[in-house]
Amino acid sequence: MRFARALAVSALVLAVAGCEKKQEPAAAGQQQAAAPSDTILIGHVASLTGEQATFGESTDNAIKLAIAEANANGGVKGKKLALKTYDDQGKPEEAAVAATRLIVQDKVAVLLGEVASSRSLAIAPIADTNKVPQISPTSTNPRVTKDGTKTRPYVFRVCFIDPFQGTVMAKFAHENLKLKRVAILRDVGNDYSVGLADYFSAKFKELGGEVVSDQSFKAGDQDFKAQLTAIKNKNPQLIYVPAYYTDVALIGRQARELGFKGPLAGGDGWDSAKLYEIAQGALDGSYFSNHYTHENPDPRVQNFVKKYKDTYGSVPDALAALGYDAALVAIDSMNRAKDLTGPSIRDAIEQTKGFHGVAGNITLDADHNAVKSAVVIGIEKNTPKYVTTVEP
Amino acid sequence: MARAKAVFRSILPFLLGLPVLFAIQSVTPPDYALILVSVGVNVVLAVSLNVVNGFTGQFSLGHAGFMAVGAYTAAKITTGLVGVDLPFVPQAFSDQAIFALALSAGMATAALAGFLVGMPSLRLRGDYLAIVTLGFGEIIRSVIENMKTLGQATGLSGLPPRTNLVWVGVSAIATVVMARRLAVSTQGRALFAIREDEVAAEAMGVDTTGYKVRAFVISAAYAGLAGALISHAILLATPRMFTFVRSIEVVVMVVLGGLGSITGSIVAACTLTIALELLREFQAYRMVVYAILLIALMLLRPQGIFGTREIWDLAIVRRLFRTRQLAATGPAGASPTEVRDDSTKGVV
Amino acid sequence: MTEFLQHFVNGLSVGTIYALIALGYTMVYGVLKLINFAHGDVYMVGAFSGYYLGIVGGGGEPSFFRAAYVTLGAMIACALLGFVIERFAYRPLRHRARLTALITAIGVSFLLEYGFQLSPWIRTPVQFPPGPSPRFFPPLIDFGGERSIEVLGATMPKIDLLGLGVALGLMLVLQFIVYRTRFGTAMRAVSFDPQVAGLMGIPVNRIISWTFMLGSALAAAAGIINASSRPKIEPLFGLISGLKAFVAAVLGGIGSVPGAMAGGLLLGLTEEYVAGYTDSSYRDAIAFTVLILVLLIRPAGLFGRVTVEKV
């Protein structure tokens, strides 16, 4: 009996191993077949499962949309585009393996992703060594496109970086809202949040303001009242919460429950319809910086918002908008590139100038960061309202 | 004479393995190389955790914490010494020497962390030990997240690409040789005795706490090695790589392979890593399939792939190699881990 | 003083959630000596069943009836889930090494977490599986007017107060079941020695099933109480709470019902005061340090009985 079971398990193990063996030649054959065919493969590494799955999902949805549109318009250089997405579970090691597989095995022309800087940092060296351009939609850490002091040749992004966005809100709070005392509540496990908080804090102090309290939490926490009570006792005029909407909605509610009346402020991580659904008006009077506003009458924006809503049933969040832009930049560059090899596409991406994207006009600077203006959005009656635009 | 034989037995695997590793290194395409690296790192992790969870019967959930210690130490050294060349030797050699230094330092600090964690907590047993090791793992991660010099949540990036298949292979062989030599030594006997019955072992004069701490320190050192290797393969060390979920993944490999079975750990580590890679095509369904696979495998073969025994103890393998006299391995007879442990009574 | 009191109120609100989840861990551990790793996910499923029940029935308006219907319904749904998990994932492995069942527990946990993260197959009347994006848990009860009361300067939302009441009620009911009923006596006997209990004519399998169902129902109640107060639910939100509750159960002495309650409240308050008065970025680290210190001084937890092993 025991022997039979052992045999069954060994058979299972061998079967798995065998599958791999068999796949190797098959995959190799496909590669050779795929290269001259009439489709261009675009790779996407996303967190489709795990803690940050909701961000990976909206980015992936938007990219699918962009590719479908491009195909409807005749594709690129007469070829159809196809998307291949691999899940990385939100882990940097997995992101590295997925990116390698997309580049070497699937031979993608362009690599899109990742949402989070910590995972883009794992992908960047792989893109560089294999000479396949990587466009990150939302990784805001300055180090993503840098290798020490020099710029990584094959790594680009379509969003602004932490130093810019953090200072936008600091300036807005100090100059427009005329506030002197602020508190910060940051997500200590998230590089995006820590980066924004640091730059905000530095700029606000530089402008002569005072940061009276700097508290932190961890994504996935349900209760923030301990930190908020401590913050409230310091009597700040504003609480800066650079975090994702998943946590911000609860933070807003709990701040109000504790009787904090002042505004909260944050960054582009706030932008999602879910924020208003969960906050239920708790964030009224608050502000956040973003790449664009849904109210923008620009047909491109309206068209995107409408299409996304029709396809997926929800208003696109900032991650979706940037994912869409990343795909658009990739497609546009491939159209402009003289051929579809990595270096030519790279050169084309580098020359991107004043590209008319959904989330603002994109010009890539020498460090491969998108230079674009930020908008400040205020929340009134549980709906976002455009307030002002801040130029870089 | 016996000593010379033992030394020979420890060295032989390296002598046989090195040429093979260099051969593999030279022919493997880069996409498989990274997968092979993660397979090798998982082998190091699983076999080293087996020393604590399998040999000694202590339930540790803090392996990822030690990985983090090793990874950050090694990363600090290699990034700090980047561009530094040893005199009189070619640059490639100098790089590798510095990497060897970094790996050793990572092992040393992880071992130190293991000692600091093990010393107080190994007085506890069973699930209490599990929760304390888990707690220490989270504390280590929390400290890293708050330290500016360690890059906080972003971690350290831009590490030099030093990990290759030879390093990973040598580390895996070293871990296996260590575990194997340990299992057949006096030290190993003491560990098995502790697993079988701690009270009886103590009555027989085994310094249970001392042996447990030593096992823990050894295991932590190799976890540090694994952490250093993986961080120099993906050129990044961030706290996100070392969550308690990572520890759980390793525990799964150990239990699936069979507690106390070195070959079992190896097979489980390889199978799970490769299976997960093959399942990548399923996208979001991947982890669901993985979960079902895990449950099914455990129900089908509860004692793990090889139980507490090694691959050469299986009847089918024995029949193939009947002529050879087998060296004594582990405890014979019914698998001891299958006995229900009712030592800690509940007090509902 | 006001701040101290406010922290106390906040800590109590979190602590009751931990305590309710910890009760499930501790009861299952008591009878099976098994860490039910999937328990935190049962808590998550509890909140989602409440969410779905709120959509398909119970009327749109918040009312007492609706709250009771949703809570009881979710408790029953989770009790069934607990029964299924025990019957198919744990019972076949009962006489195996304890770590074996732990792996299936992890498997079940992954299955629930990642299964709920899949994009929906069913779209009407409810979207199932819910997918990864967070969902708003609609209010079950409308208090009308002020939503919170103020005591000595500390504000406490009425919903938290109600949650606290329900949680305490459930704990009293549990205490009654465990110590005053035939089932409770049988449960304690199984916990003491399953083999002898079997010889005494106690249907061990049935008792274990019921224990699982009871624990899962409590987790569901915790899920609803938490979601009413902090109305964001997502497939992974049981992970951290489950882990913390497990810590609480160990802190109180795993296997002990009063221990789980005390452990949960203690952990909630410790976290609260640590985050409120010291550097909150070390909150988890300090909470774990407290746990480790307690265990080093009392290795069997606060309420755990120190057993002298007889040979």
Image: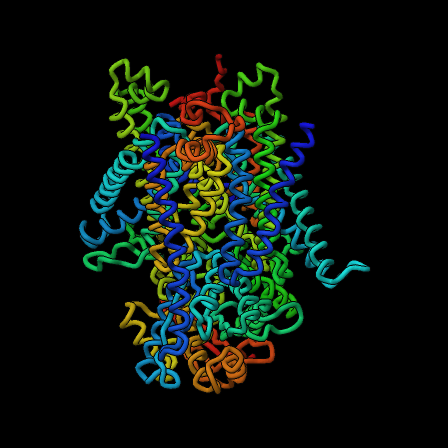
Would you say A178 lies left or right of B258 here? Answer: right
Q: Nearer the viewer, residue C188 or B306?
A: B306
Q: Which residue ends up furthest to the right in the rendered image?
A: B88
* Residue A200 % position (x, y): 58, 66
* Residue B286 % position (x, y): 36, 54
Q: Quadrant of the N terminus of chain A?
A: top left
* Residue C303 % position (x, y): 46, 24
Q: Nearer the viewer, residue C279 or A82?
A: A82
Image quarter for residue C278?
A: top right
* Residue shown at 36% from the left, 40% from the top: A9
Would you say A87 lies left or right of A124 here? Answer: left
Q: Which of C193 and C178 is in front in this view?
A: C193
Query: How was this image coloured?
Result: rainbow
The answer to whether residue C99 is seen in the rendering is no
* Residue shown at 61% from the left, 52% from the top: B19
Above or below — where is A284 with respect to A80?
above
Q: Which residue ends up furthest to the front in the rendered image?
A: B323
Above or below — where is B80 with respect to A136?
above
Would you say A37 lies left or right of B182 here? Answer: left
Q: Nearer the viewer, residue C173 or C296?
A: C296
* Residue A90 % position (x, y): 46, 57
Q: Quadrant of the C terminus of chain A?
A: bottom right
* Residue shown at 57% from the left, 60% from the top: B26
For the image shown, how many numbered marks are present on the structure?
0
The answer to whether residue B139 is seen in the rendering is yes
* Residue shown at 57% from the left, 45% from the top: B172
